[in-house]
Image (tube, rainbow, N blue to C red):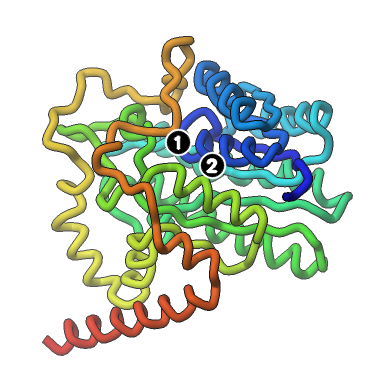
Amino acid sequence: MTAPRTVVITGASAGIGRAAAREFGARGDRVALLARGEAGLRGAAADVTAAGGEATYISVDIADHTQVDSAATQVEERFGPIDVWVNDAFTSVFAPFAEITPEEFKRVTEVSYLGFVYGTMAALSRMRPRNAGTVVQVGSALGIRAIPLQSAYCGAKHAINGFTESVRTELIHEKSNIRLTVVQMPALNTPQFSWVRSRLPHRPQPVPPIYQPEIAARAVVFAADHPRRKQYWVGASTVGTILGQRAVPALLDRYLAKTGYSSQQTDQPASADRSGNLWEPRDDDVDQDHGAHGDFDDRSRSHSPQLWLARHPRAMSLAVAGAAATAGGAAWTLRRN
């Protein structure tokens, strides 16, 4: 059992961040919860305490670097030096690129990309003097292989990968003991599909297969304990997406052009209120705590054999090698035909 740590989680009011907060709390950690929505933050703090940890929460717009840095100062004043910083906050717009305004695209980028930059800045400025700490970036398979209707979100997730690689090489150059790692996630059953801004004719949904956020949370905690340069891939769909992008990117372009619109929508008409949480939180009222789960519990998987593989690198290497060989063979057949 490790000694209690001080952990900061952005986007902690719902989804992956909310589930990860419970996981860290169950270890007895001191968990600082950052997000905008008061109801979700209060609920997350209650979850951490119930699990056995200690919690504090701060309402923060992660797109404002001064708010992020101030929050980090408050955390260290309350709990002491930050050991782990988890960047997870995001927002999005479900719409074709031609229907997204410049202001909307900028806002998504500020939250979903620059929020990670500001969080990493705040963490590293405090970890560097101690030469210790870990930053976990919650990424996505869509940061490797983009899909239609999510251009702003996909662009932000791609940017996180490049930014993290650059900073990691600087830390290696400095011979630093600080670690940065990325956890690439699959489609998850989180509240985002109910509260992001959407211009789609039908309700948005995660592209199946769908996983429960607790799977992602366990991966985040494991990555915090075992940070490594090589990314963690969560879910068989993430592995397949990334390897497919490496092997047959042009084929995926055509496939997603054909299926990417329908696979991201249910058969239910969109609600009248589709303003989403782009500018204001959807959980700013006491009765609006959305929790970790979205509306797709009956279609979501609670287990991932691939997560076990991610925790056992040798087995994972063999599995990836086999999958890569299969993908390569499929690509050769497609090209020949």
Q: Position of residue 304 (x, y in %)?
A: 39, 57
Residue 74 visible in this rendered orientation of the protein? yes
Q: Secondary structure at mark 1?
A: helix
Quadrant of the image occupied by residue 169 = bottom right
Q: Residue furthest right?
A: 129
Q: Position of residue 6 (x, y in %)?
A: 74, 39
For the residue carrying disc 2, how many other residues have a C-alpha within 10 Å: few (<14), some (14-19), or many (20+)? Answer: many
Quarter in which the C terminus is drawn: bottom left
Quadrant of the image occupied by residue 67 = top right
Quadrant of the image occupied by residue 293 = top left
At horizontal 51% and vertical 17% (from top left) the residue drawn is: 39
Give the CA separation, mark 1 to mark 2: 9 Å
At horizontal 67% and vertical 55% (from top left) the residue drawn is: 225
Q: Residue furthest top?
A: 286
Residue bearing mark 2: 88
Residue 287 versus residue 117 in the image, above or below = above
At horizontal 68% and vertical 32% (from top left) the residue drawn is: 53
| In contact (CB < 8 Å): disc 1 and disc 2 | yes
Residue bearing mark 1: 15
| Tag 1: amino acid | Gly
Name the side, left or right, on which 233 lies relative to 48.
left
| Tag 2: amino acid | Asp
For the residue carrying disc 1, how many other residues have a C-alpha within 10 Å: few (<14), some (14-19), or many (20+)? Answer: many
Res 235 label: none
